[in-house]
Amino acid sequence: MPSTPRRSLLAALLGSATLLVACAQASAPGTAPASAWASRDAALAAALPMPDAGRYDTHYLEWTDPSRARAVPAKLYLPALSAGPVPLVVFSHGIGGSREGYTYLGKYWASQGVASLHLQHAGSDRSLWTGNPLTLMSRLQDAARESEAMDRVRDLRIALDRLLADRLGARIDSTRIAAAGHSYGANTTLLAAGARVQRGGEALDLSDPRIRAAVVISAPPFYGETDPQAILRNVQVPTLHITAMADDIRIPGYYSGVQDRTAVFASTGSTRKALAVFKDGSHSIFTDRLGTGGAELNPQVKVATRELALGFLRSVWSDQADPLETLASRHQALLARFEYQR
């Protein structure tokens, strides 16, 4: 890891935290063939309600940012039944993930009329799990460098540029775009939504003005930064923060728990923001993994997560009667804490 007096933005989220996320995802089908993804999808469909495939179209997109010579692959879930342009969520995965993850979110949102563009970040994606096991730690450290943290936000920007310029862009409402992400992806989301760190006496601004709302799932703290409010107060778009009481990152010498997720919520400058804390559930319960958190609880949390996120975004985009509190009441048995500030 970089050894600077103030640990990097990356240490903010990664430091040791990254390694736990890595361990949590290492058992997932990282570089698995298509048959493994199909098996995963079948298991998800058996465990929780999944939308009919006829309600959305899936598009694999392969882009390159020539300024960085970096591939930016993506997977777009696009509503199949919508007559006009639809809202869009740009989703950023956790470390070691890929565009194939978080299908329980993407498929559901698209079936409900919201396109979902799942990015794959080439410097911190599933390729980390390939190669010499003895160099895995080094690969994880590289994935947690500040340069990669910034490149992930640039991936988001280039993906939006390319999608909106593509033939599929005509089906996207460019005035209703949100960012969302889990773990490392939650920090990517916050940076795209306005979070700033000081570097060289200046504020590093990676925000994208097209992002009008953010869904922040299991956000690690900006570890090593002395004033989280100074970093997050510039996030002015509406934000929904989702976590769980057992949303722990724990390895020898490092611990980050739910109090860090709620501190991110408290420090965010959004005048309109919500916090949903589930009573139970692990850090990786918000991925496609089914075993974590328990066979009964896991699908319940997934259903509540995707419904709360959709309700929040619809309320932001339509500015109509807010369904979020109604949805929170529906899932009250699962929630330890719910706050909504407007």
Image: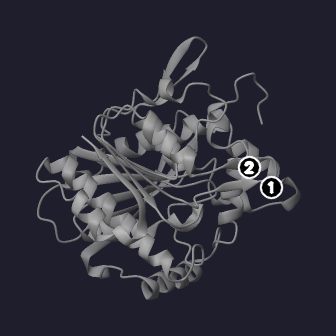
Contact (CB < 8 A) between labels 1 and 2? yes
In the rendered image, residue 273, in percent from the top left (x then y), is placed at 32, 43
- The N terminus, quarter of image: top right
- The C terminus, quarter of image: top left
Residue 250 lies, with reference to residue 232, above or below; the image says below
**Farthest residue, direction right:** 134
Q: Mark number for residue 140?
A: 2
Q: Residue at the location (19% across, 59% down)?
A: 323
Q: Estimate the spatial distance between the alpha carbons at disc 1 and disc 2, rounded to whole Å.
A: 6 Å
Q: Residue at the location (51% across, 82% down)?
A: 38
In the rendered image, residue 86, in percent from the top left (x then y), is placed at 20, 56
The local crowd at label 2, few if under 14, some if 14 to 19, many if 20 or more residues have their Cα within 10 Å, is: many
In the rendered image, residue 291, in percent from the top left (x then y), is placed at 59, 78
Is 233 positioned to the left or the right of 200 in the image?
left
Q: Mark number for residue 136?
A: 1
Q: Residue at the location (46% across, 31% down)?
A: 232
Q: Nearer the viewer, residue 153 or 222?
A: 222
Residue 153: tell me if it is visible. Answer: yes
Residue 7: quarter of image = top right
